[in-house]
Image (cartoon, rainbow, N blue to C red):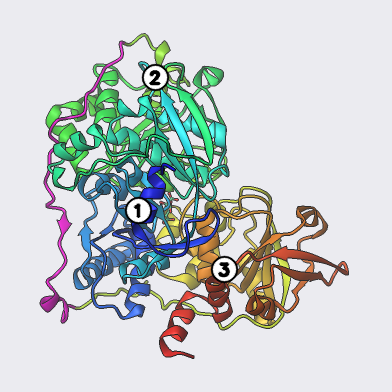
Amino acid sequence: MGMNLTQKILKAHLVEGEMVTGKEIAIRIDQTLTQDATGTMSYLQFEAMGVPRVKTEVSVSYVDHNTLQTGFENADDHRFLQTVAAKHGVHFSRPGNGICHQVHLERFAAPGKTLLGSDSHTPTGGGMAMLAMGAGGLDVAVAMGGGAFYLACPKVVGIKLTGSLQPWTTAKDIILEVLRIMTVKGGVGKVVEYYGEGVKSLTVPERGTITNMGAELGATCSVFPSDDQTLAYLKAQGRENVFVALAADADAIYDEHIEIDLNALTPRIAKPHMPDNVVAVTEVEGTPVQQVLVGSCTNSNFMELTRIAKMLKGKTVHKDVSFAVAPGSKQVFTMLADSGALADLINAGARILESACGPCIGMGQSPSTGAVTVRSFNRNFEGRSGTRDGQVYLASPETCVAAAISGKITDPRHLGLAWVDVPMPSVYKVDDNMIVSPLEPAAAKDAVVVRGPNIAALPMVGALPEAVKGSATLKVVDNITTDHIMPAGGKVLPLRSNIPKISQYVYEMVDPTFPQRALELKAKGTWSIIVGGENYGQGSSREHAALAPMYLGVKAKIVKSFARIHRANLVNFGILPLTFANPADYDKIEQGDALEILDAAKALQTGEELLTVKNVTKNFAFQVKAGLTRRQADIILAGGMLNYTRSQATGD
Ligand code: MIC
Ligand code: SF4
C-alpha cells in the first residue's frame, strides 16, 4: 500500500509507538526554533534540564515578537536570549533580522526534516516539505535536549489542487478557502497534505503562506512535496545542498479528501472575528476601511511586496486609510530597497515598520475605535489587534492594497489594474550577518548568561491531590483562543518572563476579575476549574496560557473539546484537561458552582477512562474523560513535566 508524504517523514523519525491513527507516537526532532515571547521560558526550562549543548541538527532563537522596547524588560530578555543561545549551541537571529518563520524558510528549512518550534505558525516549514510543528516551550526545550516529541499519530487530509491560480487570486485565497471548508477546528489531530497538478506552479513562499495558516485549522501541520519548485527556491537561497525530492506514493491513501480547482477560485476574505469566517471578497465589497496592514509571517515575502509596490506606484493611499507594511525579513527588506520597490511604497504613503511581528500581535498599530482594518495576517481574534471592537478582516496583500487605494473593501480584479506577474528571483540576496553563531564548546563552558530583573523563577506545583476540590471559577463559550486566556500586545508581552506579574492579565478580555477571584480561592485552599466549550485554547502555542492559570490555582479544565497545543501545555504544567462525556452537562453547570473531581489521582494511576465530578452546589454528578496516555497521566500526577522529569532522573 502506498504511503503519503506525512507517513514517510513520520516513519523516518519514529522512535516510539506504532503508526496507528490516534495512538501516541514519539518522533526525533532535527531542528528547533524559538521566538522571544516564548523563548525565555523555553531556555529557562532547557537550563533546568542541565544539558550543556543542544543535541539537534539546528536550533535557532529568533527575536521578532517583543521588539517594542518601552521599558527595560524586552531588551533584557533579548540579552538573556543571546547569551543563553551562545552558551548552549543555538544560533541567534538578532532583532531586525526578521520574523522567525520567514527567516527559517529562507535560511534553515530543509525537505524531509522535522522542526519543532515554540510558535504555532512553525508549520510554515511545511512549504519546504518539512514536518514542522508548533509546541509549548517546554516541549521544544526537551527536543533541544535530544528528547523525542510525543504526539497523537495524525489523520492525513489530502488536498488535491487542480488547475492554476488566475490573476489576482493568490496562495492566501487557497488557504482561506480551505479554512472556509474545514473551519478552525477541522484540522485538530490531522496533518494537511497538498498534492496534484495545482501544486506544481506554487513557489515555496506561496506554499509557506498556505502551510503557515494551516495553524488556523487547528492542524498539527501541513506539508507540500519537495519538487522542482523546492530546488529552485533552495538554489536561489544558495542552499541546494539540502535538497531531496520527496512526494507521496502514487497510490497513497488519505483519511479525508478535499479538492480545490484553482482555475475557479476567486479572492477571499475572512470577516471578523475568526479566520474561518470566509466569504468571497465581492460579498463585502464597498465596506469602508480605515486601516490596512501588510506583513506578518503569513504574507510578507519579496514577491508579494514587490507586487503591491507596483500596484501603488505613482498613487497615494486613500486619505481615510492608515497603511503600514512590515517586510518579513532583512532579506526581503534589503531586496525591496535595492529594487526601488521600497521607495514606491514610501512614496505612496506606506508607514514602513521593522521586520517583525508588530501589529499582528498587537505590538503597535492598534486601530481606532470600531475601525475596519484589512490585514494580510493570519488571525483576527477579537481584541488581538489591541482594540477590543476593531473589525479585523484577513485577505491577500493584493486585496489589502486594493482597499488601501480605494478606501473600501475591493476585489482586486475590479481595480482596473493589469495583473503584474512577479516571478520568484533566481538569486535571493543572502547575507547571514544578523545570525550569530553559537560559541565553540570550549569557550561556551565559561560563558556567562545575563539575566535581567524581569526574569522571575518558574512557579511549580505539587503532585495531583487525591480529590480535586474546586470551584467553577469561570465558565466560557466555544472557540476560546489563547489570546482570550493570556492576552498579548504591547502592555502584556514584556511580562512573558515573569509569571506572577503576567498572571494578573489572565482572561482580561473575558472577565478581568478572574485573577483576583482565583487567587482568593487559592488562598482558601480551593482550586479553580474552568468550564468551556468546543475547540478550547485554539491559536497560539504560548504555554503562558497554562502556566499563568496554574499559578492562579487552576487545577482542571472541563470543556467540550481542546485544541492540540493548549492541551499538551496543560499536561506539561499539571492541569487536568478533561472533556465532558456528555456535552449536555455543560449547560447544567453555572459559574461559581462548587465542583469536586472524585478520586482524581487514583483514576489517573489506574488509567480509568472516565472520572466522576460532583457538582456539590447543585447536588448531581457527571462524568468526564481524561483521554491521557500513561506518560501524560504520570506527568499530571507528578504536578507537571519538570517534576516528572526530575522524578524520573532521581527515581523518586
Ligand atoms: C501568535 O501568533 O499568537 C504568536 C504570538 O506568535 C504565538 C506565540 C506567542 O504567544 O508567543 C503563537 O502563535 O504561538
Ligand atoms: Fe508573529 Fe503574527 Fe506570525 Fe505569530 S502569527 S509569529 S505574532 S507574525
Identified by mark 1, the residue type is: His
Q: Label 2 to label 1, Cα distance in Å? A: 37 Å
Do tag 2 and tag 3 residues touch (Cβ < 8 Å)?
A: no
Magenta part of the protein: which range? 418-447
Do tag 3 and tag 1 residues touch (Cβ < 8 Å)?
A: no
Identified by mark 2, the residue type is: Gly
- Label for residue 65? 1
Crowding at mark 1 (Cα within 10 Å: few <14, some 14-19, many 20+): many
Of circles 3 and 1, which is in front?
A: 3
Name the residue furthest right: 619
Residue designated by label 2: 163
Q: Quadrant of residue 472?
A: bottom right
Q: Label 2 to label 3, Cα distance in Å? A: 43 Å
The kind of secondary structure element at disc 1 is loop
- Is 520 located above or below residue 59 in the figure? below
- The tag earlier along the polypeptide, 2 or 3, is 2
| Beta carbon of the mark 1 residue lies under 8 A of ligand 1 | yes
What residue is at 35 percent from the left and 39 percent from the top? Answer: 224
Q: Residue 83 at x, y = what percent? A: 22, 70
